[in-house]
Image: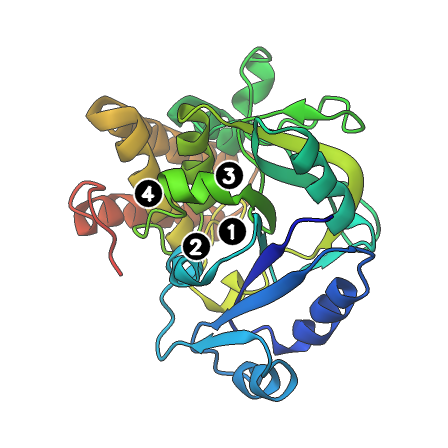
């Protein structure tokens, strides 16, 4: 008999995606019971009305303010009953066999605490689905493009491995995040200090420290659009890869928590050095004042958030 799955869905301003997301879910071939537990994070679009009209039979919480992704999921923990808990983003669309195959894997591998699957975009292009933990150094190398001089350093989004093989990994993205209920009973769900970003990285680190495995499972796939809620959750900086100020804050909180004062100091040193390197690159390549100013803006935001978070010991919201 297939185990019951509680599916946690946090929505923020993605009304246009809800129909497709729930449709793919309800066209699943999963023979067991699953139910949806939903939080709307004070959306300003038509999300609340759609959820109340079409999903009145589900557990639905309507927040008056946006409390963030991790805290919203935490609101649902007291309501879970299933053997497995699936965190599913509103911009993630499961294949018919996804629930069945991933739950079967968990049933047959009792050491697996968290499972992620193969993620693709709408065109079938592979997305990073199986990641290494961030460190001050690998984040610096990735951001500055200096990683080619350090080929032995594992980057967070290393894609140079066989994606067709099951493997244990450091962490999997939270858009499709299947958790064994025992894991939540043992260590809880998300650290509420992360408003958005890094909550699943922190969680996977704690899960692995508790002796569970985090596994990438490639034999089914989920189409993931990515970044839909984040577009309206916070301003983006103008630098590099459009890093959100929310992401910068979560990164500071993570490094302080898991790498201590020394790791945080190293990160700030490398952030500053990285902005100098990127500004110099922009100058040498004639990209104009805007590109150089973006590097200054990134450094200013990062140092400002270091102070606003009381040296990465508490969140700003």
Q: Say whether residue 306 is visible.
A: yes
Residue 242 badge: 1
The Cα atoms of the two marked residues, 3 and 1, are separated by 16 Å
The Cα atoms of the two marked residues, 2 and 3, are separated by 16 Å
Residue at the disc numbered 3? 282
The crowd level at tag 3 (other Cα within 10 Å; few <14, some 14-19, many 20+) is some
The Cα atoms of the two marked residues, 4 and 2, are separated by 10 Å
2 and 3 marks in contact (CB < 8 Å): no
Pick the front one: 151 or 85? 85
Residue 237 badge: 2
Pick the front one: 188 or 227? 188
Residue 24 at x, y percent in the picture? 78, 64
4 and 2 marks in contact (CB < 8 Å): no
The crowd level at tag 1 (other Cα within 10 Å; few <14, some 14-19, many 20+) is few
3 and 4 marks in contact (CB < 8 Å): no
Q: Earlier in the sequence, mark 1 or mark 4?
A: 1
The image quadrant that residue 33 belongs to is: bottom right
SS at circle 2: loop
Q: Nearer the viewer, mark 2 or mark 3?
A: 2
The Cα atoms of the two marked residues, 1 and 4, are separated by 13 Å
The crowd level at tag 4 (other Cα within 10 Å; few <14, some 14-19, many 20+) is many
Q: Is residue 72 left or right of residue 25?
A: left
The crowd level at tag 2 (other Cα within 10 Å; few <14, some 14-19, many 20+) is some
2 and 1 marks in contact (CB < 8 Å): yes
Residue drawn where x is 23% and y is 44% of the image = 306
């Amino acid at each position: 008999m297939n185990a019951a799955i509680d599916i946690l869905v946090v929505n923020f301003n993605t009304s246009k995606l809800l129909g497709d997301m729930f449709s793919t879910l309800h066209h699943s071939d999963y023979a067991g019971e699953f139910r949806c537990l939903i939080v709307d994070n004070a959306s300003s679009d038509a999300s609340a009305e759609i959820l109340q009209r079409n999903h009145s039979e589900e557990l639905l919480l309507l927040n008056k303010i946006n409390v963030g992704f991790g805290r919203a999921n935490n609101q649902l923990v007291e309501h879970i009953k299933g053997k497995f808990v699936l965190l599913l983003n509103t911009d993630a669309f499961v294949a018919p066999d996804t629930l069945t195959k991933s739950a079967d894997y968990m049933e047959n591998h009792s050491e697996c605490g968290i499972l992620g699957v193969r993620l693709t975009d709408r065109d079938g292009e592979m997305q990073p689905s199986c990641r290494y933990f961030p460190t001050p150094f690998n984040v610096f190398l990735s951001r500055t493009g200096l990683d080619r001089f350090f080929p032995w350093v594992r980057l967070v989004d290393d894609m140079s491995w066989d994606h067709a093989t099951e493997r244990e990994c450091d962490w999997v993205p939270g858009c499709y995040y299947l958790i064994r209920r025992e894991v939540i009973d043992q260590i809880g769900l998300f650290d509420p200090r992360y408003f958005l970003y890094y909550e699943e990285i922190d969680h996977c680190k704690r899960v692995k420290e508790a002796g569970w495995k985090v596994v990438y499972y490639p034999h089914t796939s989920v189409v993931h659009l990515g970044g839909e809620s984040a577009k309206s959750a916070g301003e983006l900086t103008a630098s590099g890869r459009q890093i959100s100020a929310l992401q910068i804050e979560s990164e500071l909180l993570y490094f302080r928590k898991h790498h201590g004062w020394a790791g945080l100091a190293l990160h700030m040193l490398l952030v500053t050095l990285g902005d100098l390197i990127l500004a110099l690159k922009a100058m040498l390549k004639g990209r104009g004042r805007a590109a150089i100013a973006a590097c200054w803006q990134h450094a200013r935001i990062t140092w400002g958030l270091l102070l606003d978070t009381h040296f990465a010991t508490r969140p700003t919201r």
